[in-house]
Amino acid sequence: MSDLGFSSIRLQNLPLVYKLLITMFLITLGIGYIVSIVNLNFQYSMMDGQPGLTAADLKRAFYGDRTNTRLAAKINGGSMEQYLPNPAHKNTILNWIQDGANQDQFESTIKPILQRNCVRCHSSEGIMAQRPLTSYIDVMEVVKIDRGEPPALWARVAHTHIQSIALLLFLTGAVFALTSVSNKFKALVVTIPFFDLLADFGSRFVAKYSADFVYVMMGTGAILGLSVGVMIVLPLYEMWIKK
């Protein structure tokens, strides 16, 4: 009675329809997790202007470049430099920022460069609609010291991701709890991801104030991924391979 009879339920003994249902859920979840990692790579891997996702990319994204403005950091060694193939255009924008970001010069010189190279994405219809560069007021929002991810953006991302990922971890953990491994191991595997999830988003917030917290973010993310992998692979193994 203490475990409500669940100790007698094993994945191997479930009817075929339940095995198929659980299998499709786990496979779909695994594919989605891999796609999310690919998305992270696309989103942050060019933050420092170099290919490959590294700690430097995450520091630039979440802590920022405190020696530079956001726009200057992006076009000079950052992810937007590749879209300014003419070095003269980049230098024109950098000089404009350094000289005080005058509005008249923006309209006559800077705006045509942005329209030619940047507005396709940085507009209300583009993929970077949250950061438009179509007007002087818009551009002045990024002609500020680059302090990384703002708290409002962190809160918007964190509250949806924590809730949705926690639900997926609960469902995956419930399946993993029906495997035949020891209860101590199951207890460890199903609880660690929740702590990692909270630590990951917590360190993402603190990284705005201390860049070295990106290493905590990377570590907790890796452990979370490993735990999810175990909770997906082991049930599949027990249902379809283990004799």
Image (cartoon, rainbow, N blue to C red):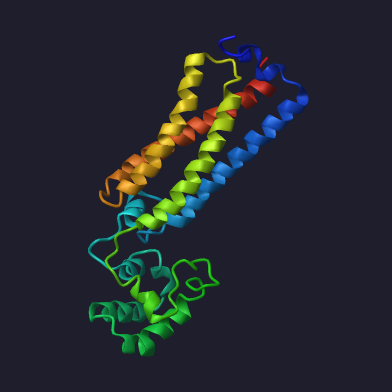
Residue 52 at least partly seen: no
Extreme-front residue of the structure:
1
Question: What quarter of the picture does the C terminus occupy?
Answer: top right
Residue 75 lies, with reference to residue 155, above or below; the image says below
Q: Position of residue 151 (x, y in %)?
A: 35, 55
Residue 231 at least partly seen: yes
Give the tally of numbered discs.
0
Question: Closest to the observer: 60 or 142?
Answer: 142
Q: Is residue 140 left or right of residue 161?
A: left
Name which residue lies at 27% across and 45% down: 212
Q: Is residue 237 left or right of residue 152?
A: right
Name which residue lies at 76% across and 21% down: 15
Q: Position of residue 72 (x, y in %)?
A: 31, 70
Question: What quarter of the picture does the N terminus occupy?
Answer: top right
Q: Is residue 181 left or right of residue 69?
A: right
Q: Position of residue 69 (x, y in %)?
A: 28, 68
Name which residue lies at 48% across and 25% down: 189
Q: Residue 66's image quarter?
A: bottom left
Name which residue lies at 61% across and 26% down: 175
Residue 106 lies, with reference to residue 62, above or below; the image says below
Question: Closest to the observer: 9 or 87?
Answer: 9
Q: Position of residue 200 (x, y in %)?
A: 39, 41
Residue 188 lies, with reference to residue 76, above or below; the image says above
Q: Residue 98's image quarter?
A: bottom left
Question: Closest to the observer: 77 or 198?
Answer: 198
